[in-house]
Image: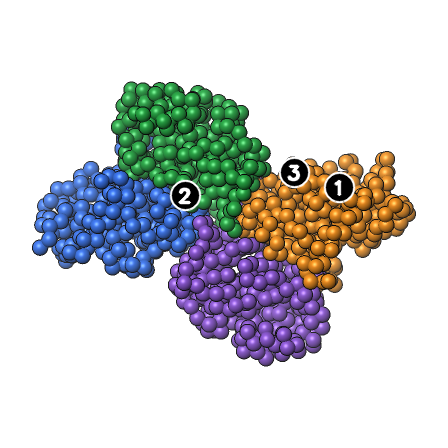
Chain colours: A green, B purple, C orange, D blue
Amino acid sequence: MGEITSLSEAVRELVRDGDTVAMEGFTHLIPHAAGHELIRQRKAGLTLVRMTPDLIYDQLIGMGSAKKLIFSWGGNPGVGSLHRFRDAVEKGWPQPLALEEHSHAGLANAYAAGAANLPFAVLRGYSGSDLPKHNPMIRRIRCPFTGEDLAAVPAIRPDVAVIHAQKADRKGNVLIWGIVGVQKEAVLAAKRSIVTVEEIVDRLEAPSNAVVLPSWVVSAVAPVPGGAHPSFAQGYSRRDNRFYKAWDDISRERDTFLSWMERHVLGTKDFAEYRRSLEAA
Amino acid sequence: MGEITSLSEAVRELVRDGDTVAMEGFTHLIPHAAGHELIRQRKAGLTLVRMTPDLIYDQLIGMGSAKKLIFSWGGNPGVGSLHRFRDAVEKGWPQPLALEEHSHAGLANAYAAGAANLPFAVLRGYSGSDLPKHNPMIRRIRCPFTGEDLAAVPAIRPDVAVIHAQKADRKGNVLIWGIVGVQKEAVLAAKRSIVTVEEIVDRLEAPSNAVVLPSWVVSAVAPVPGGAHPSFAQGYSRRDNRFYKAWDDISRERDTFLSWMERHVLGTKDFAEYRRSLEAA
Amino acid sequence: MVDYTADEMMTIAAARLLKDRMVCFVGIGLPSAAANLARLTHAPEIVLIYESGTIGTKPTALPLSIGDGELAETADAVVSVPEIFRYWLQGGRIDVGFLGAAQLDRYGTLNTTVIGDYAHPSVRLPGAGGAPEIATLAGEVFIILRHSKRALVERLDFATSAGLLPGERVEGPGWRGKGPTALVTDLGLLKPDLDSREFTLASLHPGVTLEQARAATGWDLKVAPGLTTTPPPTAGELEALRALHDRTRRAHGEV
Amino acid sequence: MVDYTADEMMTIAAARLLKDRMVCFVGIGLPSAAANLARLTHAPEIVLIYESGTIGTKPTALPLSIGDGELAETADAVVSVPEIFRYWLQGGRIDVGFLGAAQLDRYGTLNTTVIGDYAHPSVRLPGAGGAPEIATLAGEVFIILRHSKRALVERLDFATSAGLLPGERVEGPGWRGKGPTALVTDLGLLKPDLDSREFTLASLHPGVTLEQARAATGWDLKVAPGLTTTPPPTAGELEALRALHDRTRRAHGEV
């Protein structure tokens, strides 16, 4: 319960081949360091859940870790395509990728239902969209009071949720601030959870009503300063927009992607070494 | 839109006879000053909604303002009965009071559904309770994915929500902290809203992710320092537990209740004068 | 041997049921006193949650209301009331729900709603509050109330929250936990018989006789196999409880 | 007369559609540029909401992503993503949803999902994001994209979010708003014909001919009664837009 450990240890202990894994962080606080560790440890057969797959899942998909993706928007924010995601969907490389596709509203509600231990969520959604034709997990439900017809989606209940946060105290209580996305819901919806943090402090000094995850709802906490890069941690780092743009070239072709992953991820033992290898590049 | 005005003006403009009114605040930040103003202005035929009716509704019920109560726990916290509430239910004095009774979970979910513009809320609730036998607004619904049977309650959509908060800025943006209850949901679920505040400040200085109601979702903001008394405003005042105990005697008999209300509420022009009349007593 | 009151014995016996690191959803009044006594004695890492949205709260004095300021000021997190019921109680994160009651029957069904007919009650009680969902969604439920024929009754006028009936399966719709598993009174400790589901006398507090307990129970009270006597309060338990009550009186301006 | 690009005219024409104090749910990219230009010129009190949960945000530079830090730092409130979609968009608090798109048809139906067959697409696009609910739950929807036969198409491969079809009633299930009411391109402004529901040419930007617009449209583009010419950018509009883009380039380390 909120045990403070190393990221490699946490991933070894808590992530199993074939798991459903939700690595969340809505543009802010994306757990890239944890994504790299899943790749280093060659986790396979994963069902990946994430509203915005971003570079973190482009890397996992390109390295063949994923058999299925549950998502709602899969682009490189402000840049364009996720080439590895497209290659998997369009050409089945390195392996076919099954899709369960939602809107942001649908997936956000599905996480909230999971956190609330409900089997489904109700929303005014998907009207006039073709998504329900291709996703049998989007159904309709009738209001027992007004008779209104609404959309329903099943709760997301991951085996493991992985997030990055600003701070934890020595007991493993976690504080997140700024754009908090669906991270709290992802952790509360999951059976197990890993939180990487910028720093471990003696006292959280959380303001009243801040987003705090008590240590007893978190499985493992691992300090990884800068662990969201190229995403950012408000109060600690800025988004590396240059890297997001550079990724467009790195990931466009299979061979340049593979050699980059070889050199900077598989070729490094942890995130600190990865960051140094980037500076050296 | 978050217009800064006087409480008497706000109540005159925004609360109409026969309205459904939700005056929220979960022990903390109960809008007592606003309750008194409804009594002074002789608002009548109201449907009152509140999880914990507390003294504020004991007073409105005893003064004959309410025809119906939607609630989930009607006691004097830490003391015992609400005598005016009991007298209305047990003896129909001063007039009969229709009840729509829920559990806390049911009513909290109903407010959340109202804020989300959904017609109903789904919860795991009321199992084995007799409440559904007496409240036709508690129904069952089947999960379209698992077939599970769950409880459903209709959304709460008040005509007016009334709350007390710590601060507003000059534009009418409102900041609440500490025990925040269901106030945000009540305001977002309502057609109109009144917020009394401890003070108006130049800058809210709200911490990240604080509970802030932007001025454009609030109808009127009225400064009423101490306006929650005998409840409290964290950072400004402490709960007046002595008054909660004194209320047990004041409210036990109809005549002592009426003369107290005459002297301290109807006999005063505003909350400041009410507070002075209490000190004089 | 130290002197103590029946209420002190009741609160101390209830506190002993709570283990360290348990996550406990606490009702106001007697449950709150017992839960905080446990936290101040043998269970320093117990997580206390009140329905006002305060998680991991550590008050120095007992709250008079569920929403006293100190609950928020000493909490690890303060969330909204919809969230506490949706993500935390319904979320299945509560080990023990600790409830008081006005009345209960032999199955641990509680009544805090009405005495008499619902539409025309002789006594209108406060109502359900969090009880219906706490009773069914917490891992198990402890109940604490003073022992009397008016409290432990043969038949309830209203079932506010569910007890477990004979043969009822806790996997039934809406159930997550074991339901009521312990009833602590000022006379003794009652536990449900696993077959009949009926609360039976497991232990008598020192100096209390079986006859007293039977006389104060509205149903034909059965005795559990191996009826024991509750160990009396230790000096440490009494000291902690009395210090807590002293701080509480001072905090609420009663001295 | 000042010189300007077609993109500048498009962004300025889009910004002019926004009125002060409107509550606008803003997509990233072109919509974000137009919305912030409006805020920096004629609509200082406009409320900009991004799906990252930032409410009333006032960035000095355009965000490259929906979740740039400055959006949170300058917001009146920052809420969770479930809350922004449940309490704010679905809550019916949005006057205008401002969207970009890869493709749309004459009814304002958008496709950001696939080119080709869904199961075996020739081009896999990013997907829906917030569009399906923004299109139906905002009071009305403005769309901005560059005019071309590949963007304004006769037939969509996939309907990501709904347009309003002939005779479709906006009170239909799931609908709250008017649906798409304006389409701004680098060639002109299109508005739906109230009978046919089809987007028709309402105004051409200065120097653009009707033939150019028709040639760049995948369907047989009709002209609205009283076709006008878009007033050219004012010096003030251009200055504000260029200063915004300069600040943006600096903020994102491009200069």
- Mark 3 is on which residue type? Arg
In the picture, the disc for residue A235 is: 2
- 10 Å neighbourhood of mark 2: few (<14), some, or many (≥20)? few
Q: Identify the image quadrant of the C terminus of chain D.
A: top left
Q: Identify the image quadrant of the N terminus of chain D.
A: bottom left
Q: Nearer the viewer, residue D159 or C177?
A: C177
Residue B224, visible in the rendered structure: yes
Check disc 3 and report the residue beneath it.
C21
Q: Chain of mark 2?
A: A
* Cα distance between the residues tagged 1 and 2: 45 Å
In terms of secondary structure, where does tag 3 sit?
loop
In this rendering, which labeled residue sits more in front, label 1 or label 2? Answer: 2
* Cα distance between the residues tagged 1 and 3: 13 Å
Q: Nearer the viewer, residue C63 or B108?
A: C63
In this rendering, which labeled residue sits more in front, label 3 or label 2? Answer: 2
In terms of secondary structure, where does tag 1 sit?
helix
Check disc 1 and report the residue beneath it.
C16
Q: Is there one chain holding both mark 1 and mark 2?
A: no
* Cα distance between the residues tagged 3 and 2: 33 Å
Residue D158, visible in the rendered structure: no
In the image, taking residue B232 as reference, residue A35 lies left or right, namely left
In the image, taking residue A15 as reference, residue D199 lies left or right, namely left
